[in-house]
Image (cartoon, rainbow, N blue to C red):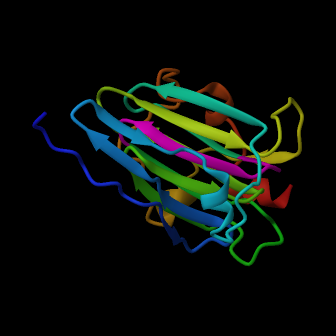
Amino acid sequence: MGGTVSPIRDLEVRPTDLDGCWVLRMKEAGDERGTVREFYRRSALAGLGIGVPTHLAQVNATRSGYGALRGIHAEAITKVVMLAWGTATSVIVDLRPESPTAGRPVRIDMLPGDGLVLAPGLGNSFQTTSREGSLYLYGFDEEWRPGMPGRAATPLDPALAAAGIHWPVPVDAADRSRISHKDATAPTIAACLAG
C-alpha cells in the first residue's frame, strides 16, 4: 500500500494588465498513476466574480507540434482555455477598439494546468514550445460558427516585437507546419483595430 499521494492543489487565479483576461492555475490532484486536473467547475469559477461563463456550449482540443503558432483570434464569445499537455507561450491582445488597453499584448508562459479566462474581444494566440507538442483546450460560452462576429490579427505583427514580445521558436511565414496561411496573412493589430 506504500506510495505517495500528492496533495490537492486548489484553483489559483491572478489578473493581467488586460481587463477581462485572467490567468488560472487549475485545481489538481495526483498520485502514482498521474494527475487529474479540473478544466471547468462552474461553482468554483463562477464564485471568482471574473466573468467566467455559467455554461460552456462547446469545448475543442487542439494538438499542435513543436513551434506551431495559432491566432490571434478574438471572437465575440467568452473563452476558458487550458494547456492540458506540453508547454506553450500564449499572447493575448486586446482587439476591442473601445477599450482603454486596445492593441496592448500580454505574454503568458504556460505549463500543464495553466489556463485563461478571456472576455469577448480579447485575441488569443499561442505557440507550442515543448518538443513533444501540446494539447490546448478551449471552452466557449457560445458555439463557434463561420462568420460569427469577431476580429483576427496576425501573430507575426512586428508591433508585438516592438512591445517586447517575441515568439520563442522562430517562424517562417511560408512554413505551414508552423503557421496557417490565414494567420500569416491576417491584418496587423493596428489595421484590425481600425477596421
Q: Is residue 133 left or right of residue 124?
A: left
Nearer to me, 55 or 148 = 55
Q: As displayed, is residue 89 above or below residue 63? A: below
Query: Residue shown at 37%/29% (left/top)?
Result: 66
Q: Is there any visible trace of residue 4 in the rendered image? A: yes
Is 79 within the magenta?
Answer: yes
Is 187 within the magenta?
Answer: no
Q: As displayed, is residue 155 above or below residue 96? A: above
Q: Is there any visible trace of residue 130 in the rendered image? A: no
Residue extent of the magenta highlight = 74-87
Nearer to me, 166 or 51 = 51
Query: Residue shown at 78%/46% (left/top)?
Result: 141
Question: x, y percentage for residue 92?
Answer: 58, 56
Query: Residue shown at 51%/36% (left/top)?
Result: 136
Taken as a whole, is the magenta stretch helix, strand or loop? Answer: strand
Question: x, y percentage for residue 71?
Answer: 61, 41
Q: Is residue 47 left or right of residue 127?
A: right
The N terminus - image quarter: top left
Query: Residue shown at 40%/49% (left/top)?
Result: 28
